[in-house]
Image (cartoon, helix red, strand yellow):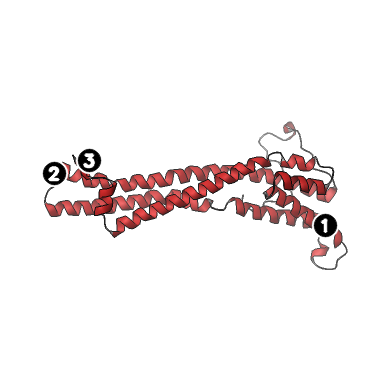
Amino acid sequence: MLTDNFGLSHLWGQSDLVIKLVALLLVTMSVASWYLIAVRAARQLRARRFDNAVEGFWNAPNLDDGLSQLSRTAAGSPFEALARQGAAAAEHLRRHTHSETLGGKLDADEFVTRALRKSIALSTAQLESGLTVLASIGSTAPFVGLFGTVWGIYHALIGISTSGAATLDKVAGPVGEALIMTAFGLFVAIPAVLAYNTFTRANRLELSELDAFAHDLHAWFTTGTRLASAPAGDAPRGAAPSSPLNLRSAGAA
């Protein structure tokens, strides 16, 4: 039967160097994609433990206990890094209040804002690590597979024309075999695109929570009081809440 003579093994055996390089490239892209998906998924599972970490921090009796609480419940998280960066900035400001240096002449509001903004920028870079690779694989893999298909069909037609046997059964096998490369490209691209969209949404939600935590920390370090949450009905419908600090201006939007 025709199907017994054509398949992946036959395609690999009769393909030239270009097809083999395309196939190896798609395999490499698939391995890289699934590696990043596994790493990012494991990170998202760990991030679920951070849900109650912020409230645990605010329920602590003092700053040291709050930082210790974050270290226990959200060790290595952007929330812990943000709180420690803000605490370090506030402590530095307290020690150098009367310093004559340029850094010592900054007011408390600006100094703490810069420290929190820096921490958010670093956390944003860490959260987005690997997403560019996933996006690139998702957008280019179908075209890499299509190139393999076009090249395979070209050589199949050249072989058919050389042999002089242009019947349907002689054409369908090699052409259908070449189409495997397009299917392989889609197999590589679809998981990468779905994972990219999923992780991008998760990062956006986490950065929103981090931004809210940064505003609360800024209010506490500069005024000694946590920023109170306004009732949902107080804001005009369709209006976005004002954010005078713009703490995420240095990070991703």
Q: Which of 154 and 43 lies nearest the eye of the viewer?
A: 43
Cβ–Cβ under 8 Å for marks 3 and 2? no
Residue at 48%, 42% (x, y): give it. 194
Q: Amino acid at mark 2?
A: Thr
Q: Nearer the viewer, mark 3 or mark 2?
A: 3
Figure quadrant of residue 183: top left
Please tell me which of labels 2 and 1 falls first in the chain.
Answer: 1
How many residues crowd mark 1 within 10 Å: few (<14), some (14–19), many (20+)?
Answer: few
Residue highlighted by disc 2: 167
Figure quadrant of residue 203: top right
Q: Amino acid at mark 3?
A: Thr
Numbered label attached to residue 91: 1
Please tell me which of labels 3 and 2 falls first in the chain.
Answer: 3
Mark 2 lies on a secondary structure that is loop
Numbered label attached to residue 3: 3
- Give the side of residue 131 with respect to residue 76, left or right: left
Label 2, label 1: how far apart the Cα atoms are: 83 Å
